[in-house]
Image (cartoon, coloured by chain):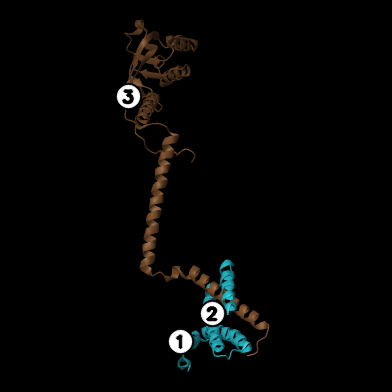
Amino acid sequence: MWLPIIGLIVGIVLGLSSEFTVPVEYRNYLSIAVLAALDTVFGGIRSYLENIFDIKVFMSGFFFNTLLAAGLAFLGVYMGIDLYLAAIFAFGVRLFNNIAVIRRIMIGRWFNDKSYND
Amino acid sequence: MRPTKEVPFIIILISIIIGFMLAVQFKSYNTAAAPESKDISQLRQDLQKELERHQRLLTEISKYDQLLYEYENPLNQADSVKVMKEELYRIQVFAGLASLEGKGLMIRIEEMPQYSGDQEISSLTQIYDDDLRYIVNELFGAGAQAISINGNRMNPTTSIRNVGNDIQIDTRVIKLPYEIRVIGDPDVLESAMKLKGFEEYFMVINKKITMKKLDKLLIPAYDGKGMIRFMKPLKEGS
């Protein structure tokens, strides 16, 4: 349970301490990628809580979603369509969905009430 | 779900990647997007502020320059005015614009007494501008500080020339007897005159030259109007 938090802290410390910055023109892609990664993480937490967590699905989802989101945004720039909006919309909705499910599960466990789970 | 040994490492790796991305995104956004988030009026205000700061700094610079100048030239205002007046007086003396008094020599050139009744002016017995110029030049060469001929002060642009049968100094006609007043060391001036044989020379053309050493001699200032035209001073170093 503590592993993700420890990893997150280590990653943040690494990112802040390193001088690595993303060029301005690639910042949009990174933000989309971050969004996708967050979505995957919350999806992972949700599946863990629902006891259907699979590390292979989680890992592939993480990388695939991240790269797909960034690639979609990249493609959109070249096609003249704001495709990153699609990514933001999709991932945003899924993020809220996942967080809502996680919230219900947590509340159900907190109050030992199974009725919240479904 | 198949719990294996790799799962914790994968989770740690992924969370590290997410943390890294978050941090980089946060940093990039903060460094690059901060100036863009200001609108025009805000930028104008900032510009105004910076301009005011610039103005203030310029004022400070000029203040310190002034201070530096005062330190380098430790004269208060009264002193500098005094210095300027002294310099002006020195220049006036040199340029012949100030009346002077001092010891010197008075040279008088007149007709020989026995010929005073002679009305005929012969070209042989006439004094030419060359003669007077020669005298003036020799006197300056002997260390004369100031010279006047019949009350006409010699200044750097004075001309002595013949116009008809008369000699003009700066377009003023002078007539015999000539009275040349010189300020300088009387002995040196007298011996210079004698050495060059002026007495003998003027005797040949029937003129008598008398020299009188005086302790107090007054030389008037140049009374013409000097006009500065056609010229302006160059700045030093240009």
Badge 3 element = strand
Q: Quadrant of the N terminus of chain B?
A: bottom right
Residue B83 image position (x, y, % from top left): 38, 28
User: Which chain is represented by brown in the image?
Assistant: B
The front one of B49 and B160 is: B49
Residue highlighted by disc 1 = A111
**Image depth: mark 2 or mark 3 in front:** 2
State how far apart marks 3 and 1 are (Cα).
Answer: 128 Å
Residue B207 image position (x, y, % from top left): 39, 10
Relative to B62, is A66 above or below?
below
Residue drawn at x 55%, y 89% is A47
**Image depth: mark 1 or mark 2 in front:** 1
Q: Residue furthest right?
A: B5
Residue highlighted by disc 2 = A34
Residue highlighted by disc 3 = B172
Answer left or right for A20 relative to B126.
Answer: right
Tell me which corner region of the image, top left, top right, bottom left or bottom right, holds residue B172: top left
State how far apart marks 1 and 2 are (Cα).
Answer: 33 Å
The chain letter under disc 3 is B
Mark positioned earlier in the residue sequence (1 or 2): 2
Badge 2 element = helix
